[in-house]
Image (cartoon, rainbow, N blue to C red):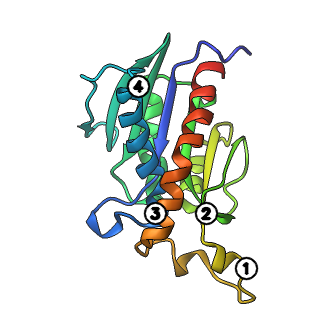
Amino acid sequence: MDNTNLKKIIVGLNNPGKAYEQTPHNIGRTFLEWLVEKLIEDQKIDKTCKWKNDKKILAKVLEAKIGHKDVIFVLPLTFMNESGNSVSKAISYYKIDTKGLMVVHDESDMLIGKSKLGFSHSAAGHRGVNSIIQNLKTQSFFRFRIGIRPTDILESKYKFKAGDYVVKKMTKENQKILLNSFEKFYIDMMRWIINS
């Protein structure tokens, strides 16, 4: 099947509310908001494109055209564990094949600032991704995983659980590491949008 003409939908997983801002668990949202600003700055999308709350799909949405591709950016307004409810509604409303879906989310087992793009993988313990798989009844979609585990935790001899840090505010140093990685993520994301 030729996927190059599919419409694209890019979802940034997050928990809503100020309490979760600048937490590792919300890196999907942080990157997606940065990505849209970068695309406008680089004149890849029209500066008149604006985020809007869409109650039909329980999300903030921004519709844009990049080259010849229709791209819909989605930030669920549901909590992380219920992300599938919003994503399934978006897929249905925009009539997009799941092979045109990219889910951007945190990866607690990956070193901070690293990333990995994959297709049709299990949730591997990520509850937001698991919710999406359950609601769509398929794992045939793309995922862009962003590493959030700080070096000191990765190298510690003690076993840390993701819950120990994913919903705590990031340090300034860790925020800087991630922001400095966004340019590379941008290149990876543009390649996927144009070529997939």
Which residue is more in the foreground, 43 or 14?
A: 43
Count neighbours of disc 3 (C-alpha within 10 A) and say few if under 14, some if 14 to 19, many if 20 or more. some
Judged from this view, the residue extending furthest toward the bottom is: 158
Q: Residue at x 42, y 67 (%)?
A: 23
Kind of residue indicated by mark 1: Glu
Residue beneath disc 1: 155
Percent position (x, y) of residue 36? Answer: 39, 35
Residue beneath disc 4: 42
Percent position (x, y) of residue 45? Answer: 38, 21
* Sequence-first disc among 2 and 4: 4
Q: Are marks 3 and 1 in contact (CB under 8 Å)?
A: no
* Sequence-first disc among 1 and 2: 2
Kind of residue indicated by mark 3: Gln
* Sequence-first disc among 3 and 4: 4
Kind of residue indicated by mark 2: Ile
Q: Are marks 4 and 1 in contact (CB under 8 Å)?
A: no
Front of the two marks 2 and 4? 4
Q: CA distance from mark 3 to mark 4?
A: 23 Å
Q: Residue at x 40, y 43 (%)?
A: 34
Percent position (x, y) of residue 130? Answer: 60, 55
Residue beneath disc 3: 175
Q: Is residue 66 above or below residue 82?
A: above
Q: CA distance from mark 1 to mark 2?
A: 12 Å
Kind of residue indicated by mark 4: Asp
Q: Helix or strand or loop: what does disc 3 sit on?
A: helix
Q: CA distance from mark 2 to mark 3?
A: 10 Å
Residue beneath disc 2: 112
Residue 135 visible: no
Front of the two marks 4 and 1? 4
Q: Is residue 157 above or below residue 136?
A: below
